[in-house]
Image (cartoon, rainbow, N blue to C red):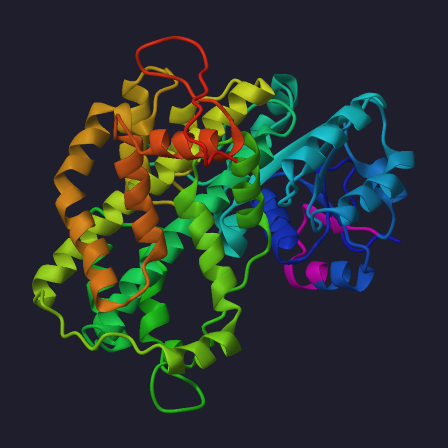
Amino acid sequence: MKKGHKKTKYDIAVIGLGVMGSSLARNIASKGFNVIGWDRHFEKAEAFYNEYGTDNIEVVKSFKEVHEDLKKPGKYLLMVPAGAPVDDVMKKLQPHLDKGDIVIDAGNSLFTDTQRRTEEWAKKGIHYVGMGVSGGEEGALRGPSIMPGGTKGDYKNLKPILEKIAAKDFNGGPCVTHIGTDGAGHYVKMVHNGIEYGVMQMMAEGYSILKNVYGLTPPEIAKIFTKYNKGKLKSYLFEIATPILEREDDFKKGYLIDYILDKAGQKGTGRWVAIDALKRGAVLPTITMAVYARSVSAFKDERIKLAKKFKKPKVKPTIPLNKFVKLLEDALYAGMISSYAQGMELIRIAAEEEKWKLNFAEITRIWEGGCIIRADLLNFLHKAYTSAKGKHVHLFEIKEVQKALEKDLPAWRKVVGYSAELGVPAPALGTSLAYFESITTGTLSANFIQGLRDFFGAHTYERIDKKGTFHTPWSNLEL
């Protein structure tokens, strides 16, 4: 049974009318496309139509009706939870799919699942496209950053809709581009989320120092973050930090932030990217530490017990507040560049192993608008990658990035050392600096590790002056 206006044919079907699905459906319809919607709970579809239905939005009860009313080739946009629910919907949708139809998985699916589904459905003549979408509910409605995988032909078919609904970059271009084949779109979105973890954790560490060392109130910290948002740290996350810190509590006197339990949640993408980095041998300390920081926060009872046994040093701040505010701004900026560099290196390594042809300038460009990590910094990185002319180079190799890091490095080192001295945990800022120091050091201490490994396990080592592998009979104590 149909609900609403009857159109001869619809441009796209949205499968799953939850928060993100309904927002995307409204966005697509507002750009002049005809949308047909379906949800496994038809009452949810009805409620969506009753609130937002227009001449070019329809909801139906069955996949059969969806199939009958779609233009060919059919375009099916899936907005269902990642994992088994996607496979379940695809199984039910299969009898109503025609060869050449395009199924777009716009949820946060694990990229390996997308690769598997792409291969499985290609055998049935169905084009399966994994597509990362960032921006939350507001972005989905007003314009997200969109990261589609699939073939170039798939992107050509979807481009008219995707370019219309995407956010705009700093030059007014659509924040969408064809990322690469099979799981590339979901992979880039996964790493995007990992970078998001790192950025938020570093922001939280700055908040912690300002609160616990300088004793600032939430509104006072909000003023500092507002100032940051007018400078080189201008970004969506700093923009929303102000209303979060200024919000008064509805139940007690004071500010809401002080009553929010310090246990951070996570939905899996941060863990996925950390695990994938370990599997590939990539270096991802900031993002991995940000995941660990959320995990540590979950052990609230243990933290309370141990906090009573280990007293923090009672050290008064030795840096005046006005000076520290500037140091923190520079440290956060450098730390965020480091987090991006780690994420982009992981993408580079994955691209080589998965045989994806990726454009790093384009990836940073489409993150300029719509997505959670959108920031002025992205425009700087886009220009930096553009200057590299498509070459696969480490972000730190680019001259413009070098200048920025060299300028902020003293502040970065100062803030990390200062937090350690005061007993305030700053794991993400610390590991972002440690990554920089390590990756820019020509000779590390790994030679000592190799000596130890060769002693206890005869694992051998290489020399700096001769080719080949070597083993030394270190002493009669050798195991």
Residue at image coords 34%, 47% = 431
Quadrant of res 98? top right
In this rendering, the answer to whether 18 lies above or below 334 is below
Q: Quadrant of the N terminus?
A: bottom right
Q: Residue furthest bottom?
A: 252
Could you tell me residue 301's position as x and y percent?
52, 78
Asked if one can make out residue 165 in the rendered structure from this viewpoint, the answer is no
**How many marks overall?**
0
Q: Is residue 437 left or right of residue 349?
A: left
- Decide: is 475 above or below 60: above
**Residue furthest front as drawn:** 476
The residue that appears at 48% across and 45% down in the rendered structure is 194
Q: Quadrant of residue 66?
A: top right
Please report the residue visible at 25 percent of the width from the left and 51 percent of the height from the top. 332
Judge whether residue 449 is colored magenta. Answer: no
Estimate the x, y position of residue 267 in percent, counting from the top left: 59, 55
For residue 311, which quarter of the picture? bottom left
Tell whether position 50 is magenta.
yes
- 375 or 445, which lies in front? 445
Q: Nearer the viewer, residue 292 or 72?
A: 292
Q: Is residue 124 above or below residue 196?
A: above
Q: Position of residue 29 (x, y in %)?
A: 61, 45
Between 102 and 407, the one nearer to me in the picture: 407
Q: Position of residue 439 (x, y in %)?
A: 31, 32
Q: Which residues are magenta?
A: 48-60
Any part of residue 25 in sight:
yes
Which residue appears at 31% of the width and 21% of the height? Answer: 386
352 to the left or right of 217: right
Residue that lies at the very extreme toward the right in this rendered image? 95
